[in-house]
Amino acid sequence: MIELAAVIIAVALVVLVGFIVPTVIQVRRTAMQAEQVLSQVNAELPGILKEVRQTNENVRAMSDQARMGVGRVTALMRTIGDVGETIDSVHGMIRGRGVSLAKNVVKLLSGARAVLLGLKARTTKGGQANGKQE
Protein backbone atom coordinates (compact mmCIF):
# COMPACT_ATOMS: atom_id res chain seq x y z
CA MET A 1 0.00 0.00 0.00
CA ILE A 2 2.87 2.31 0.76
CA GLU A 3 4.40 1.38 -2.54
CA LEU A 4 1.16 2.27 -4.31
CA ALA A 5 1.05 5.61 -2.53
CA ALA A 6 4.69 6.23 -3.44
CA VAL A 7 3.93 5.41 -7.10
CA ILE A 8 0.91 7.74 -7.11
CA ILE A 9 2.99 10.51 -5.54
CA ALA A 10 5.77 9.89 -8.07
CA VAL A 11 3.31 10.01 -11.00
CA ALA A 12 1.75 13.19 -9.58
CA LEU A 13 5.20 14.76 -9.30
CA VAL A 14 6.03 13.79 -12.89
CA VAL A 15 2.73 15.29 -14.12
CA LEU A 16 3.31 18.40 -12.02
CA VAL A 17 6.84 18.79 -13.36
CA GLY A 18 5.47 18.17 -16.88
CA PHE A 19 3.16 21.20 -16.45
CA ILE A 20 5.57 23.39 -14.50
CA VAL A 21 8.57 23.09 -16.85
CA PRO A 22 6.74 24.49 -19.96
CA THR A 23 5.18 27.18 -17.78
CA VAL A 24 8.56 28.22 -16.41
CA ILE A 25 10.00 28.22 -19.93
CA GLN A 26 7.13 30.45 -21.12
CA VAL A 27 7.58 32.78 -18.14
CA ARG A 28 11.29 33.04 -18.98
CA ARG A 29 10.52 33.91 -22.63
CA THR A 30 7.96 36.48 -21.52
CA ALA A 31 10.44 38.03 -19.10
CA MET A 32 13.07 38.25 -21.84
CA GLN A 33 10.57 39.86 -24.24
CA ALA A 34 9.50 42.29 -21.51
CA GLU A 35 13.14 43.17 -20.92
CA GLN A 36 13.62 43.80 -24.64
CA VAL A 37 10.51 45.98 -24.80
CA LEU A 38 11.59 47.95 -21.74
CA SER A 39 15.05 48.46 -23.24
CA GLN A 40 13.48 49.66 -26.48
CA VAL A 41 11.12 51.98 -24.59
CA ASN A 42 14.03 53.35 -22.56
CA ALA A 43 15.94 54.01 -25.78
CA GLU A 44 13.03 55.66 -27.62
CA LEU A 45 11.33 57.46 -24.72
CA PRO A 46 13.69 60.48 -24.54
CA GLY A 47 13.18 61.14 -28.27
CA ILE A 48 9.42 60.78 -27.95
CA LEU A 49 9.36 63.11 -24.94
CA LYS A 50 11.47 65.64 -26.83
CA GLU A 51 9.03 65.54 -29.75
CA VAL A 52 6.08 65.92 -27.38
CA ARG A 53 7.72 68.96 -25.74
CA GLN A 54 8.51 70.50 -29.11
CA THR A 55 4.95 69.87 -30.30
CA ASN A 56 3.63 71.43 -27.11
CA GLU A 57 5.83 74.50 -27.66
CA ASN A 58 4.66 74.74 -31.28
CA VAL A 59 1.03 74.55 -30.18
CA ARG A 60 1.64 77.29 -27.59
CA ALA A 61 3.36 79.47 -30.19
CA MET A 62 0.52 78.94 -32.64
CA SER A 63 -1.98 79.69 -29.90
CA ASP A 64 -0.15 82.92 -29.08
CA GLN A 65 -0.07 83.86 -32.75
CA ALA A 66 -3.78 83.09 -33.03
CA ARG A 67 -4.50 85.32 -30.02
CA MET A 68 -2.43 88.11 -31.55
CA GLY A 69 -4.23 87.65 -34.87
CA VAL A 70 -7.62 87.76 -33.19
CA GLY A 71 -6.54 90.92 -31.37
CA ARG A 72 -5.46 92.52 -34.63
CA VAL A 73 -8.67 91.49 -36.39
CA THR A 74 -10.68 92.88 -33.47
CA ALA A 75 -8.80 96.18 -33.68
CA LEU A 76 -9.29 96.24 -37.45
CA MET A 77 -13.02 95.62 -37.09
CA ARG A 78 -13.31 98.39 -34.50
CA THR A 79 -11.45 100.75 -36.82
CA ILE A 80 -13.67 99.77 -39.74
CA GLY A 81 -16.70 100.39 -37.53
CA ASP A 82 -15.34 103.81 -36.56
CA VAL A 83 -14.71 104.65 -40.22
CA GLY A 84 -18.26 103.55 -41.06
CA GLU A 85 -19.67 105.74 -38.31
CA THR A 86 -17.58 108.67 -39.54
CA ILE A 87 -18.75 108.14 -43.12
CA ASP A 88 -22.34 107.94 -41.92
CA SER A 89 -21.90 111.18 -39.94
CA VAL A 90 -20.31 112.95 -42.93
CA HIS A 91 -23.05 111.63 -45.19
CA GLY A 92 -25.69 112.92 -42.80
CA MET A 93 -24.00 116.31 -42.61
CA ILE A 94 -23.66 116.50 -46.39
CA ARG A 95 -27.24 115.41 -46.86
CA GLY A 96 -28.43 118.01 -44.35
CA ARG A 97 -26.22 120.71 -45.83
CA GLY A 98 -27.08 119.58 -49.32
CA VAL A 99 -30.75 120.03 -48.61
CA SER A 100 -30.04 123.43 -47.07
CA LEU A 101 -27.81 124.33 -50.00
CA ALA A 102 -30.46 123.18 -52.47
CA LYS A 103 -33.09 125.27 -50.68
CA ASN A 104 -30.80 128.27 -50.68
CA VAL A 105 -30.00 127.79 -54.39
CA VAL A 106 -33.72 127.50 -55.18
CA LYS A 107 -34.38 130.65 -53.15
CA LEU A 108 -31.51 132.44 -54.90
CA LEU A 109 -32.70 131.33 -58.32
CA SER A 110 -36.28 132.30 -57.47
CA GLY A 111 -35.06 135.68 -56.32
CA ALA A 112 -32.91 136.11 -59.41
CA ARG A 113 -35.85 135.11 -61.59
CA ALA A 114 -38.09 137.57 -59.80
CA VAL A 115 -35.48 140.31 -60.25
CA LEU A 116 -35.06 139.44 -63.94
CA LEU A 117 -38.81 139.34 -64.46
CA GLY A 118 -39.10 142.66 -62.66
CA LEU A 119 -36.31 144.17 -64.75
CA LYS A 120 -37.86 142.77 -67.88
CA ALA A 121 -41.21 144.16 -66.90
CA ARG A 122 -39.68 147.59 -66.19
CA THR A 123 -37.70 147.49 -69.39
CA THR A 124 -40.75 146.57 -71.35
CA LYS A 125 -42.89 149.23 -69.67
CA GLY A 126 -40.12 151.75 -69.77
CA GLY A 127 -39.48 151.13 -73.45
CA GLN A 128 -43.14 151.63 -74.25
CA ALA A 129 -43.25 154.69 -72.09
CA ASN A 130 -40.12 156.03 -73.73
CA GLY A 131 -41.46 155.15 -77.10
CA LYS A 132 -44.77 156.99 -76.52
CA GLN A 133 -43.15 160.02 -75.10
CA GLU A 134 -40.84 160.53 -78.02
Image: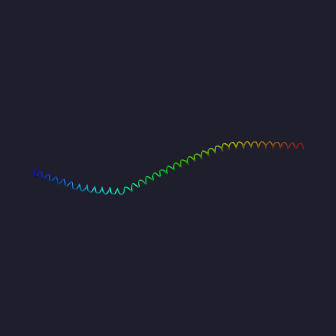
The answer to which quarter of the image holds residue 47 is bottom left
Front residue of this view, candidates 97 and 114: 97
Image check: 33 left or right of 118? left
Please provide percent x and percent y for residue 28: 26, 56
**Up-down relation of residue 113 to residue 7 (above or below):** above
Horizontally, residue 58 falls left or right of residue 89, namely left
- Residue 123, image quadrant: top right
Question: Which picture quadrant has residue 118?
Answer: top right
Find the residue positioned furthest to the right: 134
The percent coordinates of residue 13 (x first, y second) are 17, 53
> How many labels, in total?
0
The quarter of the image holding the C terminus is top right
Viewer-closest of 47 and 69: 47
Colour pattern of the rendering = rainbow
Q: Position of residue 1 (x, y in %)?
A: 9, 50
Looking at the image, which is closer to me, 24 or 91?
24
Where is residue 41 shown, x and y percent of the image?
A: 34, 56
Depth order, front residue of 22/111: 22
Q: Is residue 86 left or right of residue 103?
A: left
Q: Residue furthest left?
A: 1
